């Protein structure tokens, strides 16, 4: 079985700018002087294959590159070196419910997020009951999401993302 996600020799570098100016005036005065820039490698030569139906968990200390790797696989960032191939669509669970409109109900937000993900009305109609059941927020599904507890909000976001 071929992998649905393939990460080959992936490295990701960020630039860390030191001695940042505290004001616009300071930035303009120091513009001609070179600023100190450090390179930070969040990932170096990572290889990974994920097959359809597999479940993975990334465990590590803060700053070890877990979120960076997820963002690369979701296409949010591009690798500095190497290649990430994805067969299909990756839904990142990095910020669950971040696309929700606070004034809309949970049900309305389900449809809105489906449209954003490119799903048709027919696909959403087929998925909505499963999403609602999985979210386990009961009658709150028809209330504005701004009144949901943080746990309900995250469960709804997770349910939308995995369906």
Image: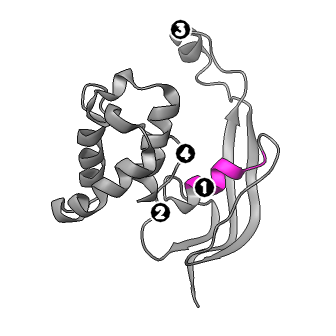
Q: Mark 4 or mark 1, which has the lower sequence index?
A: 1
Indicate which disc, 3 or 4, sits on the residue closer to the N terminus. Answer: 3
Q: Which residue corresponds to mark 3?
A: 25
**The magenta segment:** 64-71
Q: Answer few, some or many: residues within 10 Å of disc 1's Cα (few below 14, many 20 plus, some between 14 and 19).
A: some
Residue placed under numbered mark 2 in the picture: 90
Query: What x and y, as percent, mark residue 134?
Result: 44, 51
**Pick the front one: 75 or 50:** 50
State the separation of the CA atoms marked 3 and 2.
44 Å
The residues tagged by marks 4 and 1 sit, at their Cα atoms, a distance apart of 8 Å
Q: Is 8 above or below relative to 67?
A: below
Q: Is residue 2 above or below residue 148?
A: below
- 43 on left or right of 115: right
Q: CA distance from mark 3 to mark 4?
A: 37 Å
Label 3 or label 1, whichever lies nearer to me, is 1
Would residue 117 be visible to someone looking at this image? no
Pointers 4 and 1 in contact (C-beta within 8 Å): yes
- At label 3, counting other C-alpha atoms closer than 10 Å, the crowd grade (few under 14, some 14-19, many 20 or more) is few
Q: Position of residue 25 (x, y in %)?
A: 53, 8
**Which label sits in the foreground, 3 or 4?**
4
Q: Is residue 18 above or below residue 128?
A: above
Residue highlighted by disc 4? 94
Where residue 154 appears, x then y in whole percent? 49, 37
């Amino acid at each position: 079985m071929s992998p649905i996600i393939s990460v080959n020799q992936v490295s990701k570098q960020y630039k860390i700018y030191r001695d940042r100016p505290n004001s616009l005036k300071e930035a303009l005065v120091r513009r001609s002087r070179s600023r100190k820039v450090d390179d930070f490698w969040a990932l170096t030569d990572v290889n990974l294959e994920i097959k359809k139906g597999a479940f993975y968990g990334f465990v590590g200390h803060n700053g070890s590159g877990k979120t960076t790797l997820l963002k690369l696989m979701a296409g949010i960032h591009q690798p500095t070196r190497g290649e990430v191939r994805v067969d299909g669509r990756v839904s990142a669970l990095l910020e669950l419910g971040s696309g929700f409109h606070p004034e809309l109900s949970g049900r309305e937000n389900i449809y809105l997020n489906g449209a954003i993900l490119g799903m048709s009305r027919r696909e959403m109609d087929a998925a909505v009951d499963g999403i609602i059941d999985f979210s386990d927020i009961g009658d709150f599904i028809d209330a504005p999401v701004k009144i949901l507890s943080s746990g309900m909000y995250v469960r709804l976001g997770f349910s939308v993302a995995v369906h």
